[in-house]
Amino acid sequence: MKEKRPGSGEVPSILKWTGSKRSQAAQIARMAPPHARYVEPFLGGGAVLYHLAGDGTVASDLYAPLIGFWKLAQARPEALIADYAEQWRRLQDDLPGYFYAVRDRFNAEKRPEDLNFLMRTCVNGIVRFSQAGDFNNSFHLSRKGMLPASFAKAVQAWSARLRGVDFVARDYRETLAEARAGDFVYLDPPYAGNKQRYIGGIDEAALFAALDDLNRRGVRWALSFDGQRGETVYRADVPSDLYRRRMALISGNSAVAKVLNGPIETVSEALYLSW
Ligand SMILES: C[S@@+](CC[C@H](N)C(=O)[O-])C[C@H]1O[C@@H](n2cnc3c(N)ncnc32)[C@H](O)[C@@H]1O
């Protein structure tokens, strides 16, 4: 088993994704116990993956175009960089018409390059789908997209870390079913009350049953879960027999405050640890 001691540091923004853990990723990664493989079944923008990716890492998400993006970044980073530079140039020539043309194309073809472009230029960088599963956020009028040179730097910074990762599009339970004793799993599921964001949703009882199963099989895990539903924030009900510690993660770069089964009042996110 190798022990990883991730340092602090910014996660380069390779993909804008709602609910990104970029501000907490280093804190979360430092909690990781020594492990055989790192497993991340709700990958999204993969902020924690940046710190913990290694040989044998399994990274999955239900949303196939998102996994398509990661595979492209892994296999053909230069093509991804060139595509973004070209799309960015075309946007400057045709604001906002080009955005809507790409949105139509994405909804028809699901090109991962277009997902990247839309996320970088849509209102507040928020991923949002219609009931039919179409991306339906609008163009962010004051946002002309990250400069291509900055995007290229982010992709290059990620490149070496992606080498040993197996990216898979599937439900988290399939990924957890394959986790083995000695692996470490970080889970960052969508909030239960969120109907519009992301494709799919989470049934809490099923999630808790899956965590219980990991415990029985000797797989250590950490879970981000803040119980925010709609506009209401309240303490989420993760059954206390499932975890050993609950940490309060302060947003931003503040230190981790340790709260053992006490109320979390002033913080935005809780991190539950199974060991
Ligand atoms: C809060 S985001 C993860 C954010 C990520 N930690 C980051 O730093 O960007 C939750 C992710 O779970 C995915 N998801 C939703 N339902 C899922 C399911 N049943 N199985 C796997 N992934 C799912 C969504 O597509 C979304 O990307």
Image (cartoon, grey):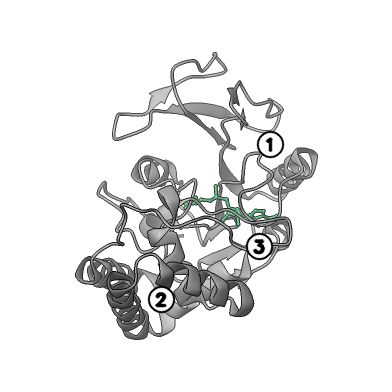
Q: Which residue is mark 2?
A: 73
Closer to the camera in the image, 138 or 4: 138
* Residue 105 screen position, x and y as percent: 55, 77
Of helix, strand and loop, which one carries label 1? loop
Residue 62 numbered tag: 3
Closer to the camera in the image, 257 or 194: 194
Tag 2: residue type?
Ala
In which quadrant of the rendered image does the C terminus lie? top right
Sequence-wise first label, 1 or 2: 2
Q: Measuring 59% from the left and 37% from the top, which residue is drawn there?
A: 274
Q: Is residue 192 above or below residue 105?
A: above
Sequence-wise first label, 2 or 3: 3
Q: Mark 1 or mark 2, which is nearer to you? A: 1
Asked whether, in this view, residue 144 is left or right of residue 120, the answer is left
Q: Which residue is mark 1?
A: 193
Q: Is mark 3 within 8 Å of ligand 1?
A: yes
Query: Do the residues under discs 3 and 1 have CB atoms within 8 angstroms?
Result: no
* Residue 195 screen position, x and y as percent: 69, 44
